[in-house]
């Protein structure tokens, strides 16, 4: 069904020790489908309670490239409006639900990618190290040399285990991802059996999920980072 619409993706069933445990059975998703036959799919993981116009524009732009774009509503399970970050096993459950939703519509696993921002970008990296997907992109992913809460290991410790080509986009002025940590991750990912590319930009103007930059220099950086995302998926989701 071409266009933008909301749907629900079932979660994979799990065994629990007692019937008293209440679990979610599905996660709401926002979908953008291309007008033409899809080349594959991309699961977008984003730390937003509400999908901003910029995020929706990005999803539509990816759809114009031929991908079915699925964005799970990661905060659906969190009632506290003060919580601004998501991580832990439930985030991976939401990714798996989006992945299964795509494969249920005939999309092959090796033509499915994941695009994550912030700690959801950390999750995208971990997905690339543990799931049978085609490609991954992380934007501003923390937890490079020290694990995040609910994360068992730092990214540099599992970088050699990457199973899918991974692109990391970082801002040199982001305190959550200092340049020396990004360089250590670059070196660690180079030991994997798949392609990896780590790119650092001055400032934070590489953030393709945020408002348009106001000057030509930052606009050029934004265009470069967005082009790299398109090219990464185009080259690896085949």
Image (cartoon, rainbow, N blue to C red):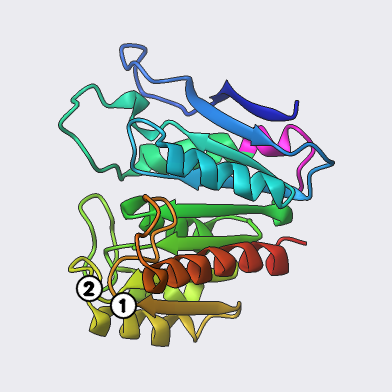
Number of on-image labels: 2
Residue nearest the viewer, comparing 167 with 190: 167
At x 48% / y 34%, what residue is drawn? 72
Of marks 1 and 2, which one's residue comes earlier in the chain? 2
Residue 132, magenta (yes or no): no
How many residues crowd mark 1 within 10 Å: few (<14), some (14–19), many (20+)? few
Tell me where residue 49 appears, x and y as whole percent: 32, 32
Residue nearest the viewer, comparing 143 with 40: 40
Q: Quadrant of the C terminus?
A: bottom right
Tell me where residue 84 appears, x and y as whole percent: 22, 39
At x 51% / y 54%, what residue is drawn? 115
Q: Secondary structure at mark 2?
A: loop
How many residues crowd mark 2 within 10 Å: few (<14), some (14–19), many (20+)? some
Tell me where residue 131 appears, x and y as whole percent: 56, 55
Residue wearing tag 2: 173
Q: Which residues are magenta?
A: 100-108
Above or below for 157 versus 96: below
Residue 104, magenta (yes or no): yes
Q: Secondary structure at mark 1?
A: loop
Say left or right for 63 vs 93: right
At x 36% / y 23%, what residue is drawn? 17
Residue nearest the viewer, comparing 104 with 6: 6
Q: Residue furthest front?
A: 215
Q: Quadrant of the N terminus?
A: top right
Q: Taking the image as drawn, is residue 11 in sight?
A: no
Residue wearing tag 1: 202
Tell me where residue 64 appears, x and y as whole percent: 70, 47
Q: Are marks 1 and 2 in contact (CB under 8 Å)?
A: yes
């Amino acid at each position: 069904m071409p266009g933008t619409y909301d749907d629900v993706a079932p979660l994979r069933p799990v065994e629990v020790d007692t019937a008293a445990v209440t679990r979610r059975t599905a996660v709401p998703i926002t979908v953008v489908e291309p007008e033409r036959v899809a080349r594959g799919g991309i699961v977008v993981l984003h730390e937003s309670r509400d999908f901003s116009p910029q995020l929706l524009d990005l999803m539509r732009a990816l759809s114009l490239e031929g991908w079915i774009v699925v964005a799970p509503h990661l905060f659906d399970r969190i009632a506290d409006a003060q919580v601004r970050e998501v991580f832990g096993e439930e985030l991976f459950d939401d990714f798996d639900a989006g992945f299964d939703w795509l494969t249920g519509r005939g999309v092959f696993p090796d033509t499915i990618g994941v695009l994550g921002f912030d700690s959801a970008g950390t999750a995208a990296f971990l997905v690339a190290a543990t799931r049978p997907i085609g490609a991954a992109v992380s934007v501003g992913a923390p937890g490079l040399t020290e694990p995040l809460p609910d994360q068992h290991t730092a990214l540099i410790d599992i970088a050699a285990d990457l199973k899918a080509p991974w692109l990391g986009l970082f801002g040199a002025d982001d305190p959550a991802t200092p340049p020396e940590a990004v360089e250590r991750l670059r070196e660690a990912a180079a030991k994997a059996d798949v392609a990896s590319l780590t790119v650092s930009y001055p400032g934070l103007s590489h953030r393709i999920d945020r408002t348009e930059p106001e000057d030509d220099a930052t606009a050029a950086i934004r265009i470069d980072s967005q082009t790299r995302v398109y090219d990464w998926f185009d080259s690896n989701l085949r």
